[in-house]
Image: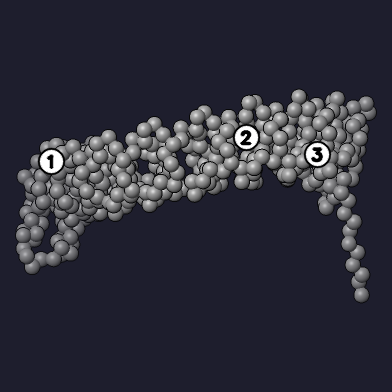
Amino acid sequence: MIFISHEEKSNLKDTLVYILDPQGNKTRKQEYSKNESVSIQARENHKRKQEQINNLINTEWVSEEEIQIKKQELYPEYKQIISLKREYDKIEDFKDGFALVGLGRKWGFINTKGEEVGEIKYDWIGNFKDGFAMVVSEGYYWFIDTKREQVGEIKYHWRGDFKDGFGKVGLGRKWGFINTKGEEVGEIKYDKIEDFKDGFAKVKSEGKWGLINTKGEEITQIKYDDIVDFKDGFAKVKSEGKWGLINTKGEEVGEIKYDWIWNFKDGFAKVELNNKWWIINTHGEEIVEPKYDTVWDFKDGFAKVKLNNKYWFINTQGEEIAEPKYDGHVEDFKDGFAKVELNNKWWIINTQGEEVIEPKYSKISITKEWSNLIAMIRTKETNTLHKRFLKKVEPEITEVQ
């Protein structure tokens, strides 16, 4: 039989592509580039060519290289000719140097020499993912690598894909991990496991969650109701309906008491409890009182806060900047200044909370002009545009000798 891989077919263009068994009969797998049929003469020619190739194969002193050269002479239209050692019920296209073949209800692989790689014994073979594929035989699951060699013991009742160097395996109703050598990482004892991410995997036992590292060591107790993946060195954990934080050592950072925690940003995280917001640092310390209706992320060292429909700012020490009186739009600080609104009028304040532009303008924008920071302001009454310097950089004068 001659088998042409998918990649090779793409190079044939208008050439007739066909697969014939040693008797010259058409097989189940064949393609035609122009809906042509295989003529009797083509079958006879194929039979003669196959006889010549088989004679070379059965001659001990003829090398594989010489056989390939002869095949190329006999079939110059094909990039490569693969002579199979026996008939198969099913043949899939070659991929990475191997083709999936079926005999009855069993599956296996052949290489580009037509040789079988291992036994044709699998009930099912999955797709390769991260260099490994799942296989099933006689009710057991295991893995094979890209060389189609067995990885791990043939004993697992369940399996999951490899990801980041670890594959999920199950024994009975319990789950665990194996590495790329097929070695078990920790114990196969958990009710549920999730893939490793950033060096940690979530595991569940008796309804509670914990974390293990890539050595299979439990870095936390299996005691949490929920765990959210690590980000910036911290993972959110839930216990008895409340949220807290742990670090990459599995240590709890601060108390587990909040209704929700946002991710850290620039070393600070927003937290909420009983509809009030405040901010904690990476040590779990609360840097402001739990009194605000809303808190925004820090930007340039300042965060907007809201209480009773009034807006103002706090710094990274939790100190309030400016009076809590602004009732409209409040923008983040930019280059040391922020726009604030009160009674439909715009102001500008500095980082000490001082109002540097009086509250009488209908529109203000902060921009840069060369090295100068300026405010472009417009009055509603006259619709006149004015320019006010916020920071004026005097040019350096260098004396020329």
Mark 1 residue element:
strand
Mark 2 residue element:
strand
Three-letter residue code for mark 2: Val
Residue that numbered label 1 is attached to: 103
Label ID, residue 271: 2
**Residue 339 placement (x, y as % from top left):** 81, 36
**Residue 237 placement (x, y as % from top left):** 51, 37
- Lower sequence index among marks 2 and 1: 1
Q: Nearer the viewer, residue 350 or 244?
A: 244
Does 154 sit above or below residue 256?
Answer: below
**Residue 112 placement (x, y as % from top left):** 21, 54
Q: Which residue is pictured at 46% across the width and 35% down the height?
A: 224
**Which quarter of the figure has residue 390?**
top right
Farthest bottom residue in view: 401
**Which quarter of the figure has residue 354?**
top right
CA distance for labels 3 and 2: 20 Å
Q: Which residue is pictured at 27% across the width and 51% down the height?
A: 182
Label ID, residue 56: none
